[in-house]
Image (cartoon, rainbow, N blue to C red):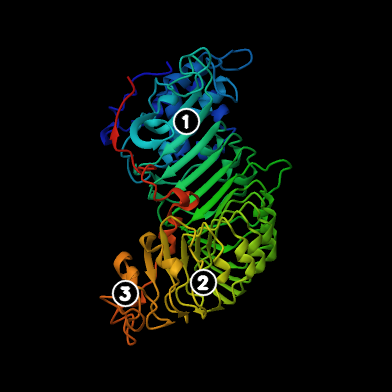
Amino acid sequence: GAEGKNDNSSSSVGDQPSQPSVSCIIDVQDRYDHAKSIVSGITPLEALENTTSPQNKALEWIVCKDKISSKLIDDRDLATGLLPKQPHGTVEGDSGEAQVLRRYALATFFFATSEQGPWNEKLNFLSEDVHECAWHHNKTRKNFPYGDFDPVGFVCTSMYPEPAAHFGETHIMLDDTEMEIGEINWNFRIPNNLTGTIPPEFGHIEDMTQIGLENQKGLHGSLPTTIGNMKNLNSLSILFTGPDFGGVIPSSLFTIPTIEWISFHFNEGTWEFPPSIQSKPGNNSLLGFTMRSCGLSGTIPYFISEFTSLTHLDFSGNYLEGGIPDSLGRLTSLEYLDLGDNNLNDTLPQSLGQLSSLEAMAFGKNNFQGTLPSWLGNLLKLRLLDLSYNKFEGAIPTTFSQLSSLEYVSLQHNTNLYGSISAFEPLNSLSSLLLYSNNFNSTIPSGLFSNFTGQIFADFGHNNFTGKLPQSLSQRASNISYLAIMGNSFDADAVDDVFCDQVAPLFADCSSCPCCKSCCREDSTGENDPLCNFDLDFYELAGLECGAWWFACHNPEIYYDPLPVNDTFFV
């Protein structure tokens, strides 16, 4: 029973389950009463007795249509009322009551999210004589944890035990006849016309391990607070949902002892942090908390600092206000921190200098102000630094010369940054330096990029740089993929012929580039000459569009197919 053909022939619109009649309940009143006593532990009687509610419909289906639940109830011990046990069950137990509750919760979800019509694909849901682990439809996609298989729906897995030939590999199960169910995954990553609200009963599938909910534009309401009952939940991913799905993130989510990854990305609704969470001693499992472009408003909550195991924190592309709390400096395991594209302000707190594991700090497109803090030079593992589109002022701290791992830097559009950029000269790993639209007024350091052998992106445009491009840079001309020096005060012979021969694109003023076939005149403006007022998109250049995977974003060997490409079956 662990592998077999997963029939999805009933996935058409006309195959939605018919509703049981009232006479059915009368015929099996004893079964109905006992089923009601079981499910009333998670559903109020008022909802169960409301004939239009998804809970009422789910209970009727359990009693009148579901052969598996009906048999369990009918075969109960008359003395104790206990139902027969499951063959192996899940890591949470093998009671028959647990299976009935699980099938009831799944049925409630089905009816609650069929508010405006049937699902596009039924995914074997409400198959009355099939174990709920088979309530999914197998599809394929590239680069997915299950290999080519991407089962959509309710997916049960386990590890092959010894002495199986595939010992240690993930094993997709269709029932529990041969072994215990190890993990239960909710994998809804394709548009399936889910319309309605997620019912509170969903949170009572307590052995759920992973939730992936994507591309369901018809959902409304919010996540149920009962999600905190999923005491084995490891990851929650909510992506590409519609404008009516949002609200306050349940505080109970943060108290789940096993939760490691929470992701809300590119959702059209608006979300808010809970005002507080109930701390639990030893609950420090959270590794990643990312809420990218999901209408998040308010301020960064102080309780974030309680999750000291966090390695990834991303609240970019939202409407957050206020400053960065000092307590964020307690997150000394952080490797990736992206707060870009918000409305944050104030100066950068000194406590961030304690983030000794940080590899990427992206604070661009905010309203941060003050001088660039010298403590940034303490972040010796830093590979990416984005402070663009802010209100920073003053000189580059000399401590920046200590950042030997630094590869990508953007200080674009701060206007009041000035002085020398010599602190970048010793950085042998530096590949991209974007300084467009500031007031830097030095020469280009002679050793800049001199020891770097990879692809170079340099934007010095619209500053007050003087002198010539250094000889060391001309020796790296073949490595330069982008060079902008327009809008400066360079010498008339600042650009050697080698740059014109080997660098493209090259943007320079006509007054400093005699070899340029096209150049920027003194009267060039954004309207009459947009290329002479163009600056690189650092977000795309550095791969920040891929979030914490920025360093591999442009790697052709790493491919993510967002939607399944075709249907398939196990045989």
Residue identifier under label 3: 531
Q: Amino acid at mark 2?
A: Pro
Q: Residues within 10 Å of mark 1 (few under 14, many from 20)?
A: many
- The crowd level at tag 3 (other Cα within 10 Å; few <14, some 14-19, many 20+) is some
How far from the left and from the top, in percent, is residue 234? Answer: 56, 37
Tell whether label 1 touches label 3 (CB within 8 Å). Answer: no
Viewport quadrant of the C terminus: top left
Which residue is drawn at the image coordinates 44% and 48% (left, top)? 552
**Residue occupied by mark 2:** 445
Marks 2 and 1 in Cβ contact (< 8 Å): no
| Residue 221 visible to an observer of this rendering | no
Q: Is residue 79 left or right of residue 559?
A: right
State the image quarter where residue 338 is shown. Answer: bottom right
Q: Residue 126's quadrant in the figure?
A: top left
- Seen at 62% across and 37% down, the residue is 258
Cα distance between the residues tagged 2 and 1: 75 Å
Label 3 element class: helix
Residue pushed farthest right?
A: 281
Q: Which residue is label 1 attached to?
A: 59
